[in-house]
């Protein structure tokens, strides 16, 4: 019999949430020390639930869970701060979520990618150019997954070189995610 694992108050972000019932959700979390975690947040949609914070995308969370199966039971959620993400940056944030969901294996810790994700969200909130933020995030995501380039780290704030960097990174990302088009890219292309 497998041993039940209990994790208490670990740093995480909500990447995806789907309705499971009238009051519950199935969530995918990105935890700094545990990687991608699938979980059930029972009663999270109730107005006074202690799990209500888990439904907040792009916010730093402290999460507790238990379970022995692939899908954990979320037992507690609290905010670990607040990020005021401007509405114009939402597509960039959703794009980063999708990259993480498609690039990383379940329950495989990636603290460097987690820190880069947190830094990217903070940078978007601070008004740093979205293109600079996204190129930096893509660069580090690929590098940490072993798909990086052998060149020195570029100056992500030099927007004159951004189109070439974007093209090179997109080619590597497409190779890495097996030629599947990203949903956020489809949405952006349909809006243009």
Image (cartoon, rainbow, N blue to C red):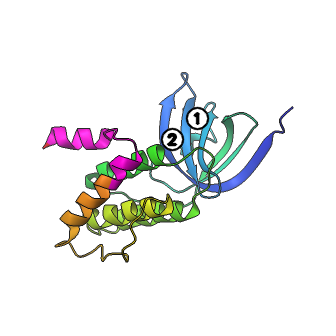
Pointer 1 local density, CA inside 10 Å: few below 14, some 14–19, many at least 20: many
Label 2, on which residue? Answer: 55
Secondary structure beneath dot 2 equals helix
Picture mark count? 2
Secondary structure mostly seen in the magenta stretch: helix
In the image, is 36 to the left or to the right of 86?
Answer: right
In the rendered image, residue 22, in percent from the top left (x then y), is placed at: 54, 22
Label 1, on which residue? Answer: 44
Q: Nearer the viewer, residue 157 or 22?
A: 157
Residue 1 versus residue 136 in the image, above or below? above
In the rendered image, residue 81, in percent from the top left (x then y), is placed at: 53, 61
Q: Quadrant of the C terminus?
A: top left
Residue 183 versus residue 138 in the image, above or below? above
Q: Which of 12 and 50 is in front in this view?
A: 12
Find out whether residue 184 is within the magenta segment: yes
Extreme-left residue of the structure = 192
Query: Which callout, 2 or 1, points at the residue further toward the start of the chain?
Result: 1
**Bounds of the magenta segment:** 172-191
Find out whether residue 156 is within the magenta segment: no
The residue drawn where x is 24% and y is 39% is 187
In the rendered image, residue 51, in percent from the top left (x then y), is placed at: 61, 41
> Is residue 56 among the parts visible in the rendering?
no
How far is disc 2 from disc 1 in space, using C-alphas?
A: 7 Å
Q: In which quarter of the image is the N terminus?
A: top right
Extreme-right residue of the structure = 1
Kindly check if marks 2 and 1 are in contact, taking CB atoms under 8 A apart as contact.
yes
The residue drawn where x is 52% and y is 60% is 114
> Is residue 132 among the parts visible in the rendering?
yes
């Amino acid at each position: 019999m497998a041993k039940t694992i209990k994790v208490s108050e670990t740093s995480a972000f909500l990447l995806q949430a789907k309705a499971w019932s009238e009051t519950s959700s199935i969530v995918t979390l990105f935890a700094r020390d545990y990687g991608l975690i699938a979980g059930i947040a029972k009663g999270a949609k109730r107005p006074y639930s202690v799990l209500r914070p888990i439904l907040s995308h792009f916010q730093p969370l402290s999460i507790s869970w238990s379970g022995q199966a692939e899908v954990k039971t979320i037992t507690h959620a609290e905010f670990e701060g607040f990020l005021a993400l401007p509405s114009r940056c939402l597509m960039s944030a959703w794009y980063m979520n999708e990259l993480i969901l498609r690039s990383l294996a379940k329950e495989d810790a990636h603290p460097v990618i987690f820190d880069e994700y947190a830094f990217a969200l903070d940078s978007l909130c601070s008004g740093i150019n979205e293109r600079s933020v996204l190129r930096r995030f893509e660069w580090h995501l690929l590098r940490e997954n072993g798909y990086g380039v052998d060149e020195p780290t570029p100056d992500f704030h030099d927007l004159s070189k951004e189109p070439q960097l974007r093209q090179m990174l997109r080619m590597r990302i497409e190779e890495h995610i097996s030629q599947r088009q990203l949903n956020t890219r489809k949405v952006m292309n349909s809006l243009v």
